[in-house]
Amino acid sequence: MGAWGAGGFENDTALDFVATIERVDDLAAALASKPGEKIDADTASTIIAAAECVAAMLGRPADDIPEDLAVRLSGFGRPQAALLEKTRNQVSLVISHSELSELWAEADNADQFNLAMTGLIDRLNPDIKPQAKKGRKKKPPFNPSPCAFCNKPMGDHAFGMFEVLVDLGEGHPARIGKWAHLSCLNARLHPAHIVQVWRSDPDVIQAEVKRILGRDNSED
């Protein structure tokens, strides 16, 4: 039986692909799936491994990244905006529309895959610096509200809430809100339906638009 794990480099397909990576173009070529078709498990595993490589190029490598691969990737530089966007799109498709997600849904430890994908999304998101505001800087508020799943305080970072619509058959459904850490919530959802929180850096988008427009103008 081959290797099988939730990490991006914990299965044989991913490790076979890793051995072939020599340049950035190898990553771009691996980040591809047929539009409208469900992504098969092997292709999905390769996409996730390539996405982990892109995350490593951003300076956020996975804990299980092979040492020799990390050395190779260190010479690739930072990923261009187009490659990063393609990576994010393909990861989203693997999560929502792949055989790999379905296989994990049938596993007893599906939460591990959900948490791995939640972490990968976070590492593929940009570090967006908040705009400086005049006046005294305020410390982020600490939210003592308990998470509905782990019962620990939400803390002073990411606050999240979900709503449940309760209908007791009286024709007057009620909405009930509950606090939850994103990781706690995702760990309990079907892999294809985890909450994907993707962020975009406006500065990066504008720079890429200018680059494309400049290239197009030069070709006229």
Image: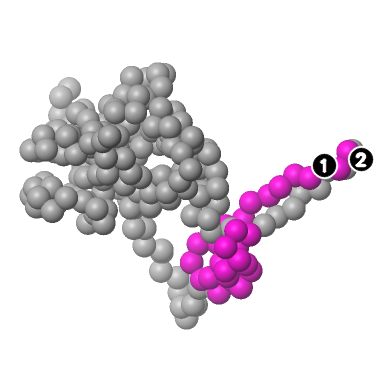
Question: Where residue 175 is drawn, which disc sits there?
Answer: none
Query: Which image quadrant for residue 210?
Result: top left
Name above or below for residue 106 compared with residue 122.
above
Residue 177 rendering spot, x and y as whole percentages: 70, 55
Q: CB under 8 Å between callouts 1 and 2?
A: yes
Residue under pointer 1: 167
Q: Secondary structure at mark 1?
A: loop
Q: Amino acid at mark 2?
A: Glu
Residue 172 rendering spot, x and y as whole percentages: 88, 42
* 210 or 184: nearer the viewer: 184
* 71 or 213: nearer the viewer: 71
Give me the residue at 51% from left, 48% from top.
186
Q: Quadrant of the N terminus?
A: top left
Residue under pointer 2: 170
Highlighted range, magenta: 142-170
Residue 44 rendering spot, x and y as whole percentages: 32, 31
